[in-house]
Image (spheres, rainbow, N blue to C red):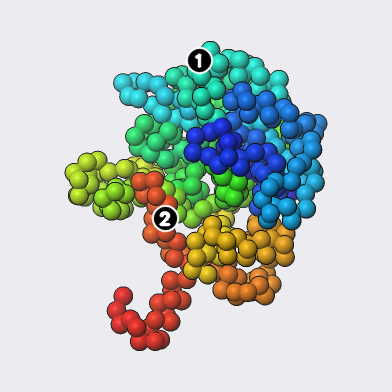
C-alpha cells in the first residue's frame, strides 16, 4: 500500500504550538495534506496521553484511528469530507536531553515511536522519576541520551528511536553548539539500535550523503509541525504493508521500492541553513564565516553556525547527487506559499486561504497538487500563475535567500520572470 507518513509533530501541550493541535483538527489537516499516517506526538505528557487513549482506538496493525471524529470549528475544514479510515496515527514523542558529557554540555532531541499503549505507559513510568513530564509536551530530561536509548533497547525493543533534526545548531546530534562529531560518541555501545536519522528542514539527503559514516542509516524527513497547516511540509512516502511492523521494516530496508522517497523543503528555506546574526543583519556562507573567524562583523560575537557549515566540517567526500541505491527525494514548497508568491500576498491571509481550499476541493489534497496533477489542469484555476509556480518548483527553478539564525529563507519563485519583464520594460539595465 502506498502512503505518506509524517512521524514528528507536537501537541497543544508543547511550547510555542497552536491551540489547534488537537486530534480532530490534526486528522482533518492530514487528509488535506495527503498524509495517511500521522504521529500522535507528545505521548510523555500525562494529559495528552490521557486524551490519546480517549480519542484513539487500535486498528489491529500497531496504528490507531479516531473513535468519533468531530468536525473542527474552522469553516474551511467543515467542508472537507472525512472518515476515521482516512488517517491513522502512530504513537510518538520527542524528548529533550540536556546533560554533560566529556566536559561539554549536550542538548539533543530524540524522536521515539511505540507500538501500543502498554509500552508507552511503561516508558512514561520510567521517565517520570527523571523529569517533570507534565511541564511540557516535549519534556527536558537531565539524562544521557545514550542511557535513554539503552533503556529502550533493553526493555522496549519494538520501539524506534530516531535522532531529531540532526544538524540544527541547538538540540541535535551534530549541532554546532552542543552536538557530537560522530554518532558513536553519543550512543556508544547502543549505536546499533539506531537505524534512522531525521535530516531536518535545513538539510536534504544530498547534504547528508557527503558523510560516508551516514551511509548505513535511513534518512527520514518530518514536519516537526507546531501548527496543523504545517503538517506534511516534510514527510516520507512508502509502498509497504500498512502497519507498525511494515513501517519499521520499510525504513530499515532503505529499499527504494518500499521507501519511495522523502518530501523535503528546499534546504535553503530552513531556519538554520546558513550562518549569521539575525539582529545584526548578517548572513554568511560557511566560507564567509571562516574568513571572519566565525565572528559577527557588526557586534563581534560568535555567529550562529548553521547546518551547511557543520556538513562542510564533517563531510569526507564531495557533493553526491547519484541516488542509485539510495532513497530518492523531492524538494517541494508548501502550496499556500506558492499561492502567496503568485498573488503577492502573505501565506496565511484570507485570500490565499480561499484559493488554497479551492485547489483542495478541485484536486483532493496538497501532495497530489504539488507532485502529480498535470500543470495543464492546475492552470485552469485562476490565477494561472499559481500553476506556473508549481511548474517552476517541480523544475527547481527557485531562488532562495538562505535561512539563518532562526529565520526562514526567503523564496523567490518568480524572480527570473519578473527580471525578464522588467528588462523588457526597460526598467533594469544591470544585474
The numbered mark at residue 130 is 1
Q: Residues within 10 Å of mark 2 (few under 14, many from 20)?
A: many
The residue wearing badge 2 is: 409
Q: Say above or below: 5 vs 357.
A: above
Q: Residue at x 51, y 24 (%)?
A: 135
Query: On the rendered structure, is 292 left or right of 384?
Result: left
The numbered mark at residue 334 is none
Q: Residues within 10 Å of mark 1 (few under 14, many from 20)?
A: few
Q: Nearer the viewer, residue 212 or 188?
A: 188
Q: Residue at x 60, y 19 (%)?
A: 124
Residue 220 visible in the displayed image: no
Counting from the top left corner in percent of width and height, residue 244 is at: 71, 33
* Circles 2, 1 touching at the beta carbon (< 8 Å): no
Classify residue 180 by image quadrant: top left
Q: Nearer the viewer, residue 258 or 307?
A: 307
Q: Say above or below: 84 vs 287.
A: above
Q: Say above or below: 127 vs 175.
A: above
Q: Quadrant of the C terminus?
A: bottom left
Counting from the top left corner in percent of width and height, residue 301 is at: 22, 41
In what element is the residue under mark 2? loop
Q: Residue at x 77, y 46 (%)?
A: 86
Q: CA distance from mark 2 to mark 1?
A: 38 Å
Q: Nearer the viewer, residue 282 or 353?
A: 353
Amino acid at each position: 500500500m502506498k502512503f505518506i507518513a509524517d512521524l514528528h509533530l507536537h501537541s497543544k501541550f508543547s511550547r510555542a504550538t497552536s491551540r489547534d493541535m488537537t486530534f480532530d483538527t490534526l486528522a482533518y489537516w492530514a487528509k488535506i495534506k495527503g498524509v495517511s499516517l500521522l504521529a500522535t506526538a507528545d505521548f510523555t505528557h500525562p494529559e495528552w496521553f490521557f486524551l490519546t487513549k480517549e480519542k484513539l482506538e487500535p486498528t489491529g496493525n500497531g496504528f490507531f484511528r479516531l473513535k468519533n471524529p468531530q468536525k473542527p470549528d474552522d469553516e474551511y475544514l467543515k467542508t472537507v469530507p472525512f472518515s476515521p479510515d482516512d488517517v491513522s496515527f502512530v504513537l510518538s514523542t520527542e524528548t529533550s536531553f540536556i546533560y554533560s558529557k566529556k566536559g561539554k554540555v549536550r542538548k539533543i532531541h530524540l524522536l521515539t515511536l511505540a507500538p501500543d499503549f502498554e509500552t508507552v505507559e511503561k516508558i512514561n513510568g520510567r521517565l517520570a522519576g527523571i523529569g517533570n513530564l507534565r511541564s511540557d509536551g516535549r519534556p527536558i530530561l537531565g539524562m544521557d541520551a545514550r542511557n535513554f536509548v539503552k533503556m529502550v533497547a533493553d526493555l522496549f525493543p519494538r520501539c524506534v528511536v530516531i535522532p531529531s533534526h540532526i544538524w540544527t545548531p541547538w538540540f541535535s546530534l551534530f549541532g554546532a553548539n552542543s552536538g557530537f562529531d560522530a554518532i558513536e560518541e553519543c550512543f556508544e555501545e547502543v549505536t546499533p539500535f539506531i537505524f534512522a536519522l531525521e535530516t531536518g528542514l535545513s538539510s536534504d539527503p544530498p547534504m547528508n550523503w557527503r558523510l560516508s559514516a551516514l551511509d548505513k542509516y535511513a534518512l527520514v524527513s518530518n514536519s516537526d509541525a507546531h501548527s496543523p497547516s504545517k503538517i506534511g511540509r516534510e514527510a516520507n512516502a512508502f509502498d509497504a504493508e500498512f502497519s507498525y511492523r511494515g513501517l519499521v521494516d520499510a525504513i530499515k530496508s532503505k529499499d527504494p521500492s518500499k521507501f519511495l522517497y522523502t518530501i523535503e523543503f528546499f534546504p535553503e528555506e530552513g531556519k538554520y541553513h546558513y550562518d549569521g546574526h539575525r539582529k545584526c543583519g548578517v548572513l554568511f556562507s560557511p566560507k564567509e564565516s571562516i574568513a571572519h573567524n566565525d565572528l559577527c562583523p557588526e557586534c563581534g560575537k560568535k555567529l550562529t553556525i548553521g547546518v551547511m557549515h557543520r556538513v562542510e566540517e564533517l563531510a569526507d567526500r564531495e557533493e553526491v547527487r547519484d541516488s542509485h541505491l539510495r532513497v530518492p527525494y523531492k524538494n517541494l514548497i508548501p502550496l499556500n506559499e506558492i499561492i502567496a508568491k503568485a498573488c503577492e500576498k502573505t501565506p496565511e491571509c484570507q485570500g490565499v486561504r480561499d484559493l488554497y481550499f479551492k485547489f483542495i476541493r478541485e484536486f483532493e489534497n496538497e501532495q497530489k497538487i504539488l507532485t502529480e496533477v498535470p500543470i495543464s489542469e492546475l492552470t485552469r484555476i485562476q490565477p494561472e500563475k499559481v500553476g506556473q509556480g508549481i511548474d517552476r518548483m517541480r523544475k527547481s527553478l527557485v531562488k532562495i535567500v538562505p535561512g539563518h539564525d532562526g529565520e526562514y529563507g526567503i523564496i523567490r519563485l518568480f524572480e527570473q520572470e519578473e527580471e525578464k519583464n522588467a528588462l523588457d520594460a526597460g526598467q533594469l539595465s544591470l544585474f
